[in-house]
């Protein structure tokens, strides 16, 4: 081969090599991993779904408060999980953020942790014990459930421990302002507005250069409360929240219409019990926190004697700060959640809708917890975090899982309550100690009937009993058609007590009671409510009852959306102490009910004519 040919060959080879290099570079550029969307939903991206390649790191974000009294601003512990492409390819992604007081463990359920409920109304209970939380490991154990769900779909997932828990500094306050400002600080850091540090007490800073500044929050129960808390600060960058069974008023969690009431399943719990339960932060700061928060602020504010609403409770009601909220709201709750009851979600949903925030609500028929279907959550976050115009704001406002359907197949409605529902008033006809009648017709001069309080009889037993002196029960004829209830039932009970204080409990039940194995809650319980007759005029001031004097007590039952099947009877049951929820005074208090002054109002789809037709026997 002569030199001329050799030179041409070298040049040609070089050109091919360079062309190949640029071709490869071009191919690499076109195959960089990015989020993928289909039908308005973020899809799982192959390049994002390998956990071994995810980048995980911890940091501490500085807040604007010092609640542990050490003279330094509290720092919140934050854990980040992100696709490696946010480092190797400079990819920026939106963030799904979960905050919790539970990541480092909770106090043991020892004898005496809960308040003793066995005492007379108005008497103080004996002091309870205060167990210490033993932190789980040196680093909080943070759930991977959201990481596994959202990182493969093109999100960064961030967790933080709330104040005074885990590796976060400060003190728990159970709904105090610092628990709103803590997630706000984390969001401010994700948007580049405040400092984050590599260590809990160092000065080396770290930035969220991989964040687009679009943040969504979600979580269940307390973890669902904190998205509402953060949103009511109005923090910029929090674009969407999906709270699941959140506490939106700690008064409503631990009280009902002036009555001291426990959350279902946790008889004797109160806000200070929850404080002890979650206080897993720095052991050296706990004595200060206990003295300031639990033994002063809470002790002086919770008022287990009267159950009245006061400034302490008002400061733990997120409704008061709704004017600042801007985040699009997808709310989720169970109609038979007797822990965090369904009024919590409805009140915030209703207010958010009134002030013009994009809203949807998902209700199911089960108990505590239960997120919306992944499709709903995906569309919500895709729209408000990725900015994909998928039309979610034009979807139905309310999605309700019907009684016999699976949770991932809700029925769409224009709104909740159902716009086609209207209030129907039902009246009582005497019948004690057996069941009296309940109908839309008012029969005058029904007189008065009396029940005797005895907490040892459960609500279930009282509803099932053919006759009982411990409750008053009024039932409709058997329904000839299904009846759809949607909204908030209301009751007015005109009563007199034989003592200066009494519990008042109301259950709406579907009869006959279904005892079969596998019976659903909706087969038996329609809804429930409780009230303190001493607060018949005001939630903020109790007045002792004059024995024998009649008082009118009006209050809402819990929101519901339920179809009562043909062949069932709707039962309106009035009793005093509820074994599962209220204090347990000694048996014997008599409540006398004036039937002519007592009524039940039901929100019925189709209104009075529909209900009358179903009751026409």
Image (cartoon, rainbow, N blue to C red):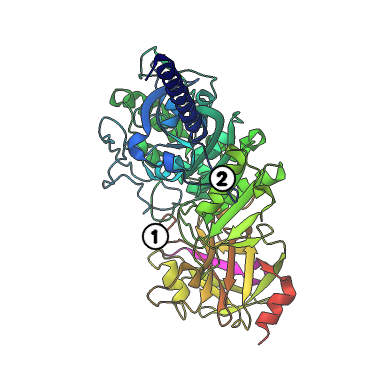
Q: Name the residue under label 2.
A: 37
User: With 26 as the anchor, is 204 left or right in this view?
Assistant: left
* Foreground residue among 392 and 219: 392
Q: Residue at x 47, y 20 (%)?
A: 207
Q: Name the residue under label 1.
A: 586
Extreme residue toward the top, this view: 203
Which of the two labelled residues, at mark 1 and mark 2, occupies the earlier sequence position?
2
Q: Residue at x 48, y 57 (%)?
A: 337
User: With 168 as the anchor, is 549 left or right in this view?
Assistant: right
Instruction: State if disc 2 and disc 1 touch (CB < 8 Å).
Output: no
**In the image, is residue 112 above or below residue 288?**
below
User: With 539 as the anchor, is 471 left or right in this view?
Assistant: left
The secondary structure type at the circle numbered 2 is: strand
- Label 1 and label 2: CA atoms lie apart by 62 Å
Extreme residue toward the bottom, this view: 617
* Foreground residue among 204 and 121: 204
- Per the rendered image, the range of residues in magenta is 586-602
**In the image, is residue 338 above or below residue 224?**
below
* Foreground residue among 470 and 252: 252
| Residue 600 covered by magenta stretch | yes
Residue 489's x, y, as percent? Answer: 63, 62
Q: Quadrant of the N terminus?
A: top left
Extreme residue toward the right, this view: 609
The secondary structure type at the circle numbered 1 is: loop
* Foreground residue among 274 and 562: 562
Q: Residues within 10 Å of mark 2 (few under 14, many from 20)?
A: some
Q: In which quarter of the image is the C terminus?
A: bottom right
Closer to the eye: label 1 or 2 = 2
């Amino acid at each position: 081969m002569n030199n001329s040919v050799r030179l041409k060959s070298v040049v040609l080879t070089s050109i091919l090599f360079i062309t190949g290099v640029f071709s490869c570079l071009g191919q690499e550029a076109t195959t960089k991993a990015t989020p993928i969307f289909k039908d308005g939903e973020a899809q799982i991206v192959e390049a994002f779904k390998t956990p071994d390649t995810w980048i995980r790191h911890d940091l501490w974000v500085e807040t604007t408060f010092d609640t542990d009294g050490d003279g330094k601003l509290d720092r919140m512990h934050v854990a980040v999980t992100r696709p490696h492409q946010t480092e190797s390819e400079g990819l920026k992604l939106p963030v799904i953020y979960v905050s919790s007081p539970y990541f480092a463990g909770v106090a043991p359920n020892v004898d005496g942790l809960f308040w003793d409920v066995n005492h007379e109304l108005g008497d103080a209970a004996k002091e309870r014990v205060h167990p210490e939380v033993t932190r789980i490991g040196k680093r909080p154990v943070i759930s991977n459930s959201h990481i596994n769900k959202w990182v493969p779909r093109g999100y960064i997932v961030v967790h933080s421990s709330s104040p005074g828990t885990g590796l976060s500094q400060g003190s728990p306050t159970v709904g105090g302002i610092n628990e709103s400002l803590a997630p706000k600080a984390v969001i401010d850091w994700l948007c580049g507005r405040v400092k984050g540090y590599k260590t809990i007490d160092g000065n080396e800073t770290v930035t969220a250069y991989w964040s687009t500044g679009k943040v969504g929050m979600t979580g269940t129960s307390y973890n669902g409360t904190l998205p509402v808390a953060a949103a009511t600060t109005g923090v910029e960058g929090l674009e969407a929240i999906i709270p699941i069974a959140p506490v939106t008023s700690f008064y409503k969690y631990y009280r009902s219409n002036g009555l001291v009431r426990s959350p279902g399943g946790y008889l004797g719990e109160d806000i200070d019990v929850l404080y002890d339960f979650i206080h897993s932060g720095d052991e050296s700061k706990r004595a200060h926190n206990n003295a300031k928060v639990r033994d002063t602020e809470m002790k002086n504010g919770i008022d287990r004697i009267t159950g009245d609403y006061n400034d302490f409770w008002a400061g733990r009601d997120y409704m008061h700060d709704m004017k600042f909220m801007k985040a699009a709201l997808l709310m989720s709750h169970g109609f038979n959640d007797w822990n965090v009851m369904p009024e919590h979600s409805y009140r915030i949903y209703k207010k958010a809708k009134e002030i013009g925030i994009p809203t949807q609500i998902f209700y199911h028929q089960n108990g505590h917890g239960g997120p919306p279907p992944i499709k709903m959550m995906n569309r919500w976050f895709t729209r408000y975090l990725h900015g994909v115009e998928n039309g979610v704001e034009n979807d139905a406002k309310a999605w309700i899982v019907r009684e016999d359907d699976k949770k991932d197949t809700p029925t769409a409605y224009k709104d909740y309550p159902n716009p086609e529902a209207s209030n129907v008033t039902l009246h009582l006809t005497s019948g004690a100690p057996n069941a009296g009648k309940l109908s839309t017709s008012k029969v005058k001069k029904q007189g008065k009937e009396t029940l005797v309080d005895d907490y040892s009889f459960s609500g279930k037993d009282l509803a099932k009993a053919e006759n009982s002196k411990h409750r008053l029960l009024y039932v409709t004829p058997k329904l000839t058609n299904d009846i759809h209830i949607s909204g908030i039932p209301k009751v007015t009970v005109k009563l007199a007590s034989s003592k200066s204080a009494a519990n008042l409990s109301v259950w709406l039940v579907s009869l006959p009671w279904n005892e079969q194995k596998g019976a659903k809650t909706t087969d038996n319980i329609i809804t429930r409510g409780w009230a303190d007759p001493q607060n018949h005029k005001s939630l903020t001031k109790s007045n002792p009852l004059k024995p024998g004097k009649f008082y009118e007590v009006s209050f809402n039952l819990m929101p519901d959306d339920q179809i009562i099947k043909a062949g069932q009877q709707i039962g309106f049951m009035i009793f005093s102490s509820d074994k599962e929820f209220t204090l347990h005074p000694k048996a014997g208090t008599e409540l006398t009910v004036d039937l002519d002054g007592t009524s039940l109002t039901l929100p019925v789809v189709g209104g009075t004519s529909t209900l009358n037709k179903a009751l026409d026997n």
